[in-house]
Amino acid sequence: MDGSSKDDEMRIMEGWLYRIRSNKFGFQYSRKRYYVLQNRLLKSFTSVPISLHKDPLRTAFVNSSSCVMESGKKSIRGKVFFIFTLCGISSNGVSVKLGARNPEEAAKWVEAFQKVSLKMTQNPLSLVSIKDHKAADVSSYWTIFGCHNGLRLFKETRNEYDQNKVVHSAIAAMSVIDGAPEVVFQILMSLGSTRSEWDFCFKKGSVIESIDGQTDIIHKNLNGDWLPWGMKPRDLLLQRYWSREEDGTYVILYHSVLHKKCPPQKSYVRACLKSNVEDT
């Protein structure tokens, strides 16, 4: 079997998509690129590559914490796109927004990314599959580094693609809560004063913009008591997406964004959250 045949076997999904970006004035524009989802890599090219040995324009790594959000139909400069956003695949924490020209094509890409992420969580990269300290220690992806009041803390193991990069390992936590999923979901979504009863970092929060029935932009001010002396307190401006799965599971996804209604404040340092999923 020749090299090109091996390349073809590794191509999970490929085709023309549009990268959706915003200029410095906040206006969105699109750039047409040819994308190839190859094993765990998403590569973009300016033209259809004859071989995947050709250097791509950009490459992103899809891992088990990567998430895809559908943003629906949108018109940008006279062109209609069916948009979806990829979170957790960029080393600098910026999500990648892509658009297809028809809903069928967008659905195929969303399904392909979900399958890749799911495959990685099942082999054996899922926090859900870690039942005890011994199992966590043999995981090739997550390593447990602490346990406090029943809350298990995990640190991401750097993969081969990050060895020569300056990256910060992801931190994850898992716990079992004695309560109905609907109740836990409402508690996690709350930005009121009662949140500080269980979230020691939280000072105050508010909804900046409601985008749709499952997405909004929120702002959180964090207490500075847990930081070293002399450090300014942090705040977060996050896009929050939530959904209820068929089995009754609730998923909440956060990632940092920019918004003209909530610029950085002088008394706070704007923190960046690359991606975070709360699963109840």
Image (tube, rainbow, N blue to C red):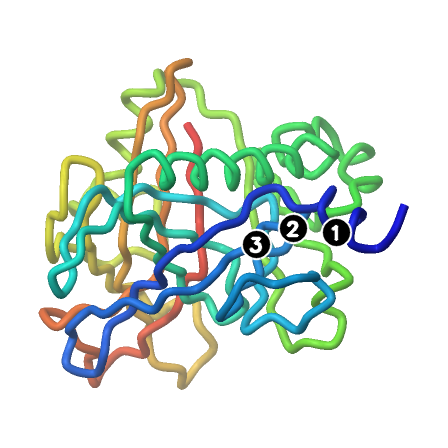
The residue wearing badge 2 is: 38
Quadrant of the rendered image containing residue 73: top left
Query: Would you say the residues marked 3 and 2 are in contact, meaning their CB atoms lie under 8 Å apart?
Result: yes
Between disc 1 and disc 3, whose residue precedes? 1
Q: CA distance from mark 1 to mark 3?
A: 11 Å
The residue wearing badge 1 is: 7
Question: Type of residue at label 2?
Answer: Gln
Q: Quadrant of the N terminus?
A: top right
**Drawn side of residue 271 relative to residue 217, left or right:** right
Query: Would you say the residues marked 2 and 1 are in contact, meaning their CB atoms lie under 8 Å apart?
Result: yes
Q: Closer to us: mark 2 or mark 1? A: 1
Q: Nearer the viewer, residue 190 or 55?
A: 55
Residue at 29%, 55% (x, y): give it.
Answer: 202
Q: Position of residue 253 (x, y in %)?
A: 37, 44
Question: Type of residue at label 1?
Answer: Asp
The residue wearing badge 3 is: 36
Q: Position of residue 273 (x, y in %)?
A: 41, 62
Between disc 2 and disc 1, whose residue precedes? 1
